Image (cartoon, rainbow, N blue to C red):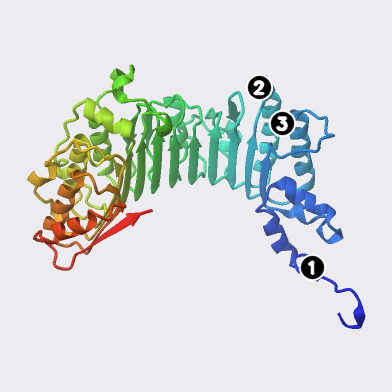
Amino acid sequence: MEGGGEERTEDRLSNLPEPLLSTILSLIPTKQAAATSILSRRWRYVWRSVTRLHLLHDLPTSDDDNRSDTQIWDSMMGCVERSVHGPVHACRISFIPSSPSSLGSYALRLHAFIDSLVGKGIRELAVVNRGAGCYELPSQAFFCQTLEKLELAGNCTLSVVPPPSSPSPFSAGNNIKSLVLYRVHLTNDQFREMISCCKLLESLKVDCCVKVRHLSISAPKLSSLEIVTLKRIRISLAGVASLKQASFRFLLAFENTCIPYCNDSSREEDGDQANKLIQLLIHLSQCNLERLSLHFCPVYSECLQWQGADVAYSLPPQHHLHALKKLNLAISLSNLQVATVLSCLLSSCPNLSELVIQDKEQVDTIGSFWESHYPSQSMLNRLRIIRIHGVNLNRSYWTGFVKFLLMNACACERITIHYFHDPWKRPVLEQKFSSFQWASPHAVLELKPLS
């Protein structure tokens, strides 16, 4: 600044239009957004026009705050109710009751707050209970006609009680299009009733829910499905003709705490896992599925091996996955039973064009399995892109599979293998693979080391 005066810093942020400032504050935790009211007169009321709320119970308070957790929770809820008068499009609530007895106070206050959100036209609602006790979401939120996305996580449950105007839970409906259930407490009947009420459901994610043993899903508009399970459950799909992409992660236990399957005293309760898997694939054949992801943890693979799973080399022709274009697998490629599952899939997806495999285990138990296989129709005519991740060059089991691909995939354009670095063996393998008679003259083989 000329004349030796002090240079004044321009406050460009405060000069932004108020709707834009409100949008910015909608992206941060609500407590921090409210704190901006003390910055200046310009900021005093900006936070009150936010349309997205983030209420996080674990935000730190000052050392001289002698209020109990429930009092702080009640104060935060009350402040938001008094201050935010406009529409609320989205709200994420995360709380941590210190004990099951304190959950009642949280629940009563939260019920009233959710009622106010329903009156403000809430579109997206997420409730996360990271503490003790099981919180039950009020049914008026589930049946709110403006709600399009619902997420329940942690110790939560839902009793599907229809509005008084609906004669039964199965005739009641809502407008939810996206539903996420993460480790919530639901019985088989509760889950089935919940899904039956979501007549417009397009996206469903179920992650390790407690108590559920049978996931029965019927949703005519469902296009995206993701299921992660730790339990020995059965999955039934009916009326899902619109399903385009599906992902299934089969985890018999948390991967970082898995015990050897041979030492699991409860393994007799598993049932025929191979049959459950084949039935699931048959259900998927009834829709126009284009993308499928399957993840088998090592213990699940051990289960298939211990049971001596007998998987046919192909699904019945009437149950082929004709619409499937991309198959993504995280499996133990060295496991014989898992190899038969892969063979079955390759033979049952006649229009498959892209295959991605992540190798989960490097123990050679399949010998020359792929040497005696014949190519499926999909490999002869459609399969173009193949990617394999996590290969150990010191293992020989996968070389038979790569040889099988090179010699039979006549439409292949590129095979990329990401391997654990072994600079001495790579040149030998490249020379070995080049000696095979490749089915596709245009195929390119890439060997890329992993760091």
> Looking at the picture, how far across and down is residue 369, in whole percent?
12, 41
Q: Is residue 141 visible?
A: yes
For the residues labelled 1 and 2, the Cα–Cα distance comes to 46 Å
Q: Name the residue under label 1.
A: 11
Identity, as a three-letter code, of the amino acid under mark 1: Asp
Dot placed on the residue nearer the N-terminal end, 1 or 2: 1
Q: Name the residue under label 3.
A: 109
Dot placed on the residue nearer the N-terminal end, 3 or 2: 2
For the residues labelled 3 and 2, the Cα–Cα distance comes to 16 Å
Q: Which mark is residue 99?
A: 2
> Looking at the picture, how far across and down is residue 346, in whole percent?
19, 48
Is the residue marked by circle 2 packed among few (<14), some (14-19), or many (20+) residues within 10 Å?
few
- Residue at 24% x, 39% y: name it: 282
Residue 16 appears in which quarter of the rendering? Answer: bottom right
Q: Give the vertical position of 324 relative to 230 (above or below).
A: below
Q: Specify whether 397 is left or right of 263.
A: left
- Residue at 42% x, 29% y: name it: 257
Residue 301 appears in which quarter of the rendering? Answer: top left
The residue tagged with tag 2: helix, strand or loop? loop
Identity, as a three-letter code, of the amino acid under mark 3: Arg
Of residues 394 and 438, the one nearer the viewer is 394
